[in-house]
Each structure stands twice: as structure tokens, then as C-alpha cells.
């Protein structure tokens, strides 16, 4: 028995589940399309997701909001890849190399999407929040490497994190500007990070 005017709980749960599936389908389609076609519009994304444009707007008020959610999705995927790389295990230098490899693979897979999203203002609050899951893992890795003596530096781990994030952005920007190829930029980033930490290139 239900109170007059209230929908039965199963019906409410079913609507909520349907809405969550629609949102997930829209995000899946956005990530898949924008990785290759950063100019893709909401109509194309909606068609790929199997929903109407109105359904897209029911979940995301604008294309920018959808792009921001897509960036959050790929960031979460990148963090999962870093966790799979077991950054806290073994020598800190080896963990750092695994971090660089995982973060670069994530960048390569999502470069077009990240360039399409007008959500990155370096140093902004939203940018810091988005990076936090990555920077916290990196800070922990730096602290471990400094303690073990593998990283030869007197710099604060927090500054080292900020410097590595800035170098990562610079590496991506050099590719976008056509000044470096992806392999050249990846190699330069690796050398720069290792030297920043007082580690000979391995």
C-alpha cells in the first residue's frame, strides 16, 4: 500500500536505474566519439548513445558540461590504470617509470577529447580537484623515493608534484603545437622528470 500521490518504490527505483543507464550510455558515447572527433556535437553523441537530444539535455545542461563529465570519466580510468601499475610496490624509481607510462598512455588515448574540453584552466580549482587523485598518488611516491634515497632532491614533494603536472601539460602542448612528435615529447618528459628528481635516465 502506498500513500496517495506517491509512486511505488519499485517504479521509482526502475526510473532511477533507467536514468543511470541513459547517463552512462551518453558518457560512453561522448568519450568514444570525442577521442577521434573532438568537434562531434550533441546530436551525434545522442544518436550514438541511442537516446534523443532531449535526453542528453536532461542529464547535461550544455555540451561543456558533458565534456567536463567525459574528462572526469577518462581521469578515473587513468587513476585505475595507475593503481593497476602498483606504484607503491618495489623501488620508487621503477614505480615512477610505471606512473609515467600509465599517464602517457592515458594522454595518448584521450588527447583529442582533452583538447576539445574547455575545462582546463591550469591552476584553477576545478583543475586541482580533477588532478587530486593523481597528485596524491604521485606525492606518496615522491615521499617514498626521497625517504629511500632514490630521489636526490631537497624540494618539497608538493612542489615536485606541481612541477611534474606542469611538465606533463607542456609535453602535451608541444605535440598540439606541432613542435614535437608524440615519441619525442614522451622521451623529453621522462628525462625532465628523472632529472628533476636527481635520477640518471634509465
Image: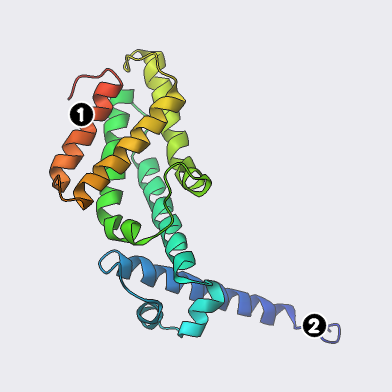
What residue is drawn where x is 30% and y is 56%?
A: 110
User: Looking at the rendered structure, which numbered label has been put on residue 191?
Assistant: 1
Judge the density around disc 2: few (<14), some (14-19), many (≥20) Cα neighbours within 10 Å: few
Report x, y in % for residue 186: 20, 40
Q: Disc 2 on helix, strand or loop?
A: loop
Of tags 2 and 1, which is closer to the observer? 1
Q: Which of the two residues, 141 or 9, is positioned nearer the viewer here?
A: 141
Vertical comparison of 46 with 181: above or below? below
Residue at point 45%, 43% (across, down) = 131
Q: Using the image, tell me which numbered label, if any, was put on residue 183.
A: none
Q: Using a 10 Å C-alpha cutoff, classify the residue at mark 1 as few (fewer than 14 neighbours), some (14 to 19) or many (20 or more).
A: some
Residue, x 14% and y 44% (percent of image)?
A: 183
Does residue 5 appear to the left or right of 33 in the view shown?
right
Please tell me which residue lies in front, 67 or 75: 67
- Quarter of the image for the C terminus: give it: top left
Q: Work out whether 177 lies above or below 86.
A: below
* Mark 2–mark 1 CB contact (< 8 Å): no
- What numbered label is drawn on residue 6? 2
Q: Looking at the picture, tell me which residue is in the foreground, 62 or 25.
A: 62
Q: Quadrant of the N terminus?
A: bottom right
First-in-chain label (2 vs 1): 2
Picture quadrant of residue 36: bottom left
Q: Position of residue 136 (x, y in %)?
A: 47, 35
Report helix, strand or loop for mark 1. Answer: helix
Amino acid at each position: 500500500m502506498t500513500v496517495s500521490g506517491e509512486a511505488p518504490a519499485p517504479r521509482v527505483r526502475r526510473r532511477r536505474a533507467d536514468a543511470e543507464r541513459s547517463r552512462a550510455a551518453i558518457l560512453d558515447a561522448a568519450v568514444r566519439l570525442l577521442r577521434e572527433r573532438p568537434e562531434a556535437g550533441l546530436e551525434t553523441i545522442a544518436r550514438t548513445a541511442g537516446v534523443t537530444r532531449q535526453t542528453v539535455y536532461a542529464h547535461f545542461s550544455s555540451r561543456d558540461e558533458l565534456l567536463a563529465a567525459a574528462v572526469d570519466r577518462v581521469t578515473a580510468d587513468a587513476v585505475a590504470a595507475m593503481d593497476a601499475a602498483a606504484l607503491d610496490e618495489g623501488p620508487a624509481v621503477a614505480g615512477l617509470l610505471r606512473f609515467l607510462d600509465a599517464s602517457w598512455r592515458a594522454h595518448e588515448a584521450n588527447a583529442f577529447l582533452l583538447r576539445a574540453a574547455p575545462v582546463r584552466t591550469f591552476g584553477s580549482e576545478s583543475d586541482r580537484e580533477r588532478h587530486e587523485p593523481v597528485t596524491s598518488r604521485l606525492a606518496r611516491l615522491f615521499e617514498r623515493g626521497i625517504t629511500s634515497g632514490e630521489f636526490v632532491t631537497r624540494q618539497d614533494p608538493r612542489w615536485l608534484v606541481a612541477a611534474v603536472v606542469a611538465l606533463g601539460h607542456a609535453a602535451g602542448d608541444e605535440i598540439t603545437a606541432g613542435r614535437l612528435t608524440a615519441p619525442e615529447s614522451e622521451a623529453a618528459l621522462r628525462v625532465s622528470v628523472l632529472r628533476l628528481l636527481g635520477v640518471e635516465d634509465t
